[in-house]
Amino acid sequence: MRVPGVMMTSPAESALCAQMVTCHELGMRLLGRAAHHSDDEISGALATRALRLLGAYQRGLEVLDKHRTRGKSRSVRIEHVHVAAGGQVAIGIPPACPST
């Protein structure tokens, strides 16, 4: 299955994306049916099933992200610095120290 705008790099990604598309489409369809059903009990059951499918879709996104990053950790370093009046601050990545 081809998903427009998504570059798949392996058969595993293709299979996962196909499952994710199916979960999302069915989940949204069930939510639509739940919203327009007159019986509250049936509407609730449809919404519950839809939320389970959309939860599976969300877990698929997490698996795809983990697969693509191959477990590489992403972090942001935040430092708090006080600057006195008239002081200057440089923001960015400091240059590497030359090896001696």
Image (cartoon, rainbow, N blue to C red):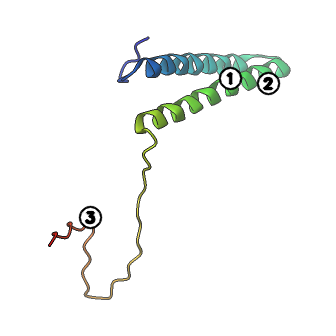
Give the amino acid at mark 2. Gly
Q: Earlier in the sequence, mark 3 or mark 2?
A: 2
Distance between mark 1 and mark 3 Cα atoms: 45 Å
Q: Quadrant of residue 52?
A: top right
Q: Earlier in the sequence, mark 1 or mark 3?
A: 1
Distance between mark 3 and mark 2 Cα atoms: 52 Å
Say which residue appears at 48% left-offset and 31% top-offset. 64
Farthest residue, direction top = 1
Q: Position of residue 29 (x, y in %)?
A: 62, 16
Q: Secondary structure at mark 1?
A: helix
Q: Which residue is mark 3?
A: 93
Q: Position of residue 46 (x, y in %)?
A: 74, 19
Relative to 100, say whether 16 is above or below. Answer: above
The quarter in which the N terminus is drawn is: top left
Give the amino acid at mark 3. Ile
Q: Which residue is mark 2?
A: 44
Say which residue appears at 56% left-offset and 17% top-offset. 25
Is residue 82 shown left or right of residue 88?
right
Distance between mark 2 and mark 1 Cα atoms: 10 Å
Q: Nearer the viewer, residue 23 or 64?
A: 64
Q: Earlier in the sequence, mark 2 or mark 1?
A: 2
Q: Position of residue 2 (x, y in %)?
A: 40, 13
Say which residue appears at 75% left-offset and 16% top-offset. 37
Mark closer to the observer (3, 2) = 3
Q: Which residue is mark 1?
A: 50
The quarter in which the C terminus is drawn is: bottom left
Is residue 36 shown left or right of residue 56?
right
Give the amino acid at mark 1. Ala
Q: Secondary structure at mark 2?
A: helix
Crowd class of label 2 (few under 14; some 14 to 19; many from 20; radius 10 Å): some
